[in-house]
Image (spheres, rainbow, N blue to C red):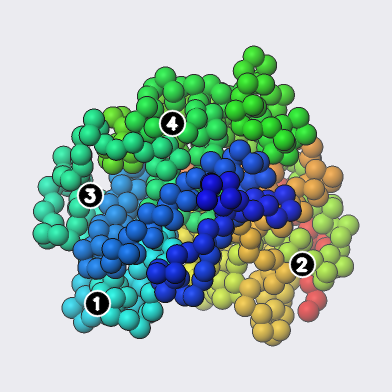
Amino acid sequence: MGKAQHLQRRGLRLYFRLAIPKDVQRFFNGKRELKRSLKTARYNDATAAARVETYRAERLFAKLRGGFMNQDEMRRMVSAYFESTMALAEDARADGSGVLSEDNEEDGSNDGLEGLDLHLSDLMDDLARGNHKGVAHVADSILDCAGITLDKGSHEYRVLCREALKGVIAATKVQLERMTGHYPEIRRPSGTFMYEQGGRDETSSSLSAAPRVLLSEALAEFVKEHNASGHWRPKTREETEGVFRLLVGIVGDRDVSELDYKVISKFRDSLIRFPSNHTKRPAYREKTISEIVIMTASTPAASPLSVSSVNKHIIRTGAFLKWAVRRGYVAANYAEGLTITKKGKASEEREAYSSEDLVKLVQSLLAGGVKLRKTHPERFWIPILGLYSGARLNELCQLHLEDIIEKDGGSGLPRITCLDINSKGEKTLKNVASRRVIPVHPILMELGFKDYVKKMREKGELRLWPSLRKKRGGFSQDFGKWFQRWNRQYVSKNPKRVFHSLRHSLADNLKQRGVDGNIIAEILGHSLGSMSLGRYGKGYEPPVLLDVLKVIDYGVEEALARMPRFEP
């Protein structure tokens, strides 16, 4: 059957479809066909993607026929997870961003070492007692990546979970060593793990002896391996696959060993001229990536990719090349040093709102009045919470009612209502330093915020804003779109003034009033600059943070105080 016959068009999208051979159908829960969206409407792009999917499917069928889930294969798969985890953590250190923890956050917390040590103790206790429930998600990720299913009550599944637990323990031990700056040569139990020694895998063949591997195949392998490690969120995977589609489209689906500095430099130079949102622009919508590159070779697009976007493509390509070096596919990371230096200070990428902007913001909320608080309460409360807490948009949009807590206000003082910013359950944070407790500003209390919380609890709600639904970008996607429209209509036309500007406004307001930078950093959820403060010092208590927040003066407080109090 020709490769094109594996394609099916439904509406504007093209899908990959391939019949599962009868002798391996038992591994697929009775399914007779593999089917997945290729996320493109372009026939040429879909044909290339289908070729990769066919190769992966045929390789999987061969593994299944050869006894895929024997113990040696389980150990090899767990080894891939182990190496991927270590590689991600080491890449984070190389970039100066700390250690990646299990939820894809920078491990810069005060108790990072202590917490990891306790975690290791728990893991080893689980291994001794045969308790593998805590790593079932790792086993599930491995199976999902392979595209097969195992009965969770089967002996094979339990063995895979146990091997996964051993791998996580080994990875955690290495993390502890590296967090203290120690990089000892690590010997593995024979046949259990394949781990890098001296920067290369002991089992890797030389580059000259490596088999031919197409760039698209290597990229697909990279995505599968990293996705199985559990460090990628769906959004991260989607964005990375978008980067890689451009990479293949611009440099061609060549043998991965043919990549060199000249090829990656060409990729960077093409990105600088490439249009942003090319799939939405009429001039480029029906063009292939290679055709767009030709169109923009002499005349850059009117709205090209931003410097940040170009750098994101180069950084993610560099992450792939680092991985490819470890796999023996290429000799070096040719993307190193190719990022573009941004002009101006980082603080100038987003601007704080002006005093006039903040007056307009409050006036528009006043105009909405009591009706806005009843019909769309999140549209009233979230902008004010952002203004007086400095919290990020998604941090506010994903709040649960249990995250509104009471803290001790000190001797003889009333308890303090606070926002507990955390990553429990389906909530996510940017990094470990983002976990914090922020007192609710008195302005919010005067407006009846606590009464709103009480009403939601009486209704039996779990989340603070029940109407917001989780999407690809988190709980903030729908609210963010509304805010941008409202912001442009009523507050500011300046493209650098967005919801994130509220954080800048708070930081600037406190800074101008002489507040210590470490306190501002803790309110905003930034890592503390001082190692002694960051690692050994406790966080500031809510009474201290509340006293700091009370000094904020935007010049709109009197207008907010005149607003009618929320009535349940």
Badge 4 marks a residue whose secondary structure is loop
Judge from the rendering whether residue 527 lies leftward or rightward of residue 560; answer left or right.
Answer: left
Task: Specify the amino acid type for callout 3.
Answer: Arg
- Can you tell which quarter of the image residue 228 is in? bottom left
Residues at badges 2 and 3 in contact (C-beta under 8 Å)? no
Q: Earlier in the sequence, mark 3 or mark 1?
A: 1
Q: Please determine whether, in this image, residue 458 is positioned above or below residue 324.
A: below
- For the residues carrying marks 1 and 2, which lies nearer the camera in this image? 1
Name which residue type carries label 2: Pro
Residue at which label 3 appears: 178
> Which sits earlier in the primary sequence, circle 4 or circle 2?
4
| Residue at 53 percent of width and 21 percent of height | 269
Local secondary structure at mark 3 = helix
Instruction: Pick whichever, 270 or 37, lies toward us.
Output: 37
Give the amino acid type for the residue marked by disc 1 in the picture: Asp
Please provide percent x and percent y for residue 275: 66, 29
- Could you tell me how far apart the alpha carbons at marks 2 and 3 are, in whole angstroms? 47 Å
Foreground label between 4 and 2: 4
Single out the mark in the foreground, 2 or 3.
3
Earlier residue among tags 1 and 2: 1
Q: Which residue is mark 2?
A: 377
How crowded pointer 4 is (Cα within 10 Å; few <14, some 14-19, many 20+) is rated as: some
Residue at horizontal 54%, vertical 47%?
2
Q: Which residue is mark 1?
A: 126
**Which residue reaches farthest front?**
1
Q: Which residue is mark 4?
A: 254
* Residue 219 percent coordinates (x, y): 43, 42
Inspect this view and state whether residue 138 appears: no
Callout 4 amino acid = Arg
Write the residue at 56% across / 52% down. Answer: 6
452 left or right of 109 in image: right
Q: Does residue 508 appear left or right of residue 491 in this picture? A: left
